[in-house]
Amino acid sequence: MIFSVGGFSLIPYLCRPNFYSMVAIVKVAGQQFKVEKDQTLYVPRVEGNAGDKLDLEVLLVDANGKLAVGATSGSKVQAEIVDQVKGDTVIAYKQKRRKGFHKKKGHRTAYTKIKVVSIA
């Protein structure tokens, strides 16, 4: 049975295609990231060269609507280092008026660009 609302047909739940993809929450260098397969992201610097493989710490996995939490999930997330890059320049400027005092310091944070190869 197909219903229509405002010209759009509402297909019953059993006939809908499965759009779920495997999603995981991983911990990299003390920060948590939500990742999917073939996703690229920038994480705080991780030691290694381009092409090296990483096994990431899995905190949560969502596989087709079924959640698995912690080490009991038994899943693995593998990633590959794509590049080592630097972020934008951040400038800290201090000044005291009428005293001739000013300081200018800057830095660029180091990041690692990784690509998630597989979630199993």
Image: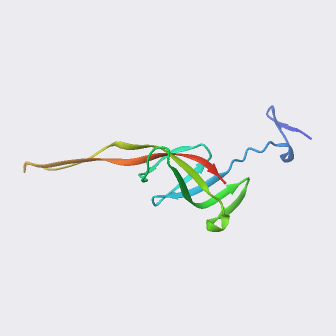
* Residue 102 vertical placement versus 69 (above, below): above
> What residue lies at 57% left-to-right and 43% top-to-bottom?
39
- Residue 28 appears left or right of 96: right
Q: Which sits in the foreground, 69 or 118?
A: 118
- Residue 89 appears left or right of 9: left
Q: Residue furthest top?
A: 7
> What residue lies at 62% left-to-right and 60% top-to-bottom?
60
Q: Residue furthest left?
A: 99
- Residue 44 appears left or right of 92: right
Q: Residue furthest right?
A: 1
* Residue 10 vertical placement versus 36 (above, below): above
Q: How many marks?
A: 0
Q: Position of residue 44 (x, y in %)?
A: 42, 52
Q: Position of residue 43 (x, y in %)?
A: 46, 50
> What residue lies at 73% left-to-right and 55% top-to-bottom?
65
> What residue lies at 71% left-to-right and 54% top-to-bottom?
63
Residue 59, image quadrant:
bottom right
Residue 57, image quadrant:
bottom right
Q: Which sits in the foreground, 102 or 96?
A: 102
Q: Residue furthest bottom?
A: 72
* Residue 92 vertical placement versus 58 (above, below): above
Q: How is the image coloured?
A: rainbow
Q: Position of residue 20 (x, y in %)?
A: 72, 47
Q: Position of residue 54 (x, y in %)?
A: 52, 53
Identify the image quadrant of the C terminus: bottom right
